[in-house]
Image (cartoon, rainbow, N blue to C red):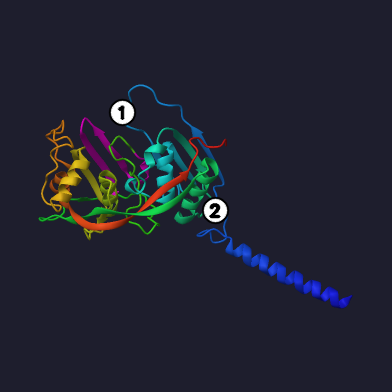
Amino acid sequence: MLYFSHVKQIFWTATAGLTLIAAAYAQPPGSKGKVVEFDAASIRVNEPETGFHFGSSESSTGGPGTGDPGMYRCSKCTLATLIGKAFEIQNYQFPGRTAFTTNTFDVAAKVPAATSAEDFQLMLQNLLKERFGLTYHYSEKKMRGYNLVVAKGGSKLKESTDAAPQAAPNRGGDQHGPGAGSFGRGGGFQVGGDHGHTGVVSFFGSARYRADHQTTADLARLLSDQLGVPVDDQTGLKGKYDVALNWTGDNTSSAANHAAAGGGAGHGDHGADGATPRDSSAPALFDALQAQLGLRLVAADQATARIFVVDHAEKLPTSN
């Protein structure tokens, strides 16, 4: 009896040890042993908007690195916007995003104390998987991009003088990841107050952008979003700036013409059909960037872009 009891005890100990090892390997990447989920979260579906409305009023506020780290809110946000924030992807990395812009949602999530930026992203990813049944994969695509550099004559950026909340860093290892104000290509999107943005607004062929306490990396992300291609910050500027930029909204043809010209002087004064933009007094984006900010975009060699592909997602979330 003693012999068999001893063997049984050894077997139990070994089995328990293997179970603990398996549990340790089962931890989600980046979780560091913590449960990567919000303390509480609700998603409310908005009623479809009717009649004329100027642009969009979606906003995203709160979370790690902001003035309200314990509560994240996304108002009138599409599923595409939520995916973009959760996975730190830009528009050009998410070519299928228009399929997920029909409905808008109000999201409110209580963030556990001392949550890191990495775990916050995992929480938002897990929320989308749980409530929308999101499944996805990545693929690679070759595309031409741009380098953002200081133009001849020097930068005209106005350095910020007053204090502002520290923005959460980009943790994805990709400087094309979305900062506040992304997913605004085509205009009309205003962002929340965490980073001093007033957003991109486009109307009758013209666009304008206002943002305070921005780095040139933030500006590169905005330009990437507007042009739909990678834009790398190669300015070497390290400060934070109050940015004001006005341009014609014809970004696509401008990008194509500049790419063909090797990133030279402005050729973006005609639309895709050869017609002059409705507001011919405003310069094209490439020209506005140089004239107003002292920066320019130089065509870069083909780069490998990481493309986000949705395999499945429900149009509406499960109930709270």
x then y, percent, for residue 14: 71, 71
Marked residue nearer the N-terminal end (1 or 2) = 2
Rendered location of residue 24, percent (x, y): 60, 64
Nearest the viewer among 76 and 101 is 101
Mark 2 element type: loop
Residue 309 image position (x, y, % from top left)? 41, 48
Residue at the disc numbered 2: 36
Closest to the observer, 157 or 8: 8
280 and 193: which is toward the camera: 280
Q: Mark 1 points at which residue?
A: 54
Q: Dot 1: within a 10 Å radius of its alpha carbon, few (fewer than 14), some, or many (20 or more) residues?
A: few
User: Is 203 part of what is drawn in magenta?
Assistant: yes
Crowding near the residue tagged with mark 2, few <14, some 14–19, many ≥20 C-alpha atoms within 10 Å: many
Lateral position of residue 165 relative to residue 133, left or right? left
Q: Which amino acid does label 2 sit on?
A: Val
Q: Give the range drawn in magenta.
A: 191-213
Left-right relation of 40 to 280: right
Q: Which residue is drawn at 40% across and 36% down?
A: 101
Left or right of 44 in this view: 297: left
> Which quadrant is the C terminus positioned in?
top right
Res 296 label: none
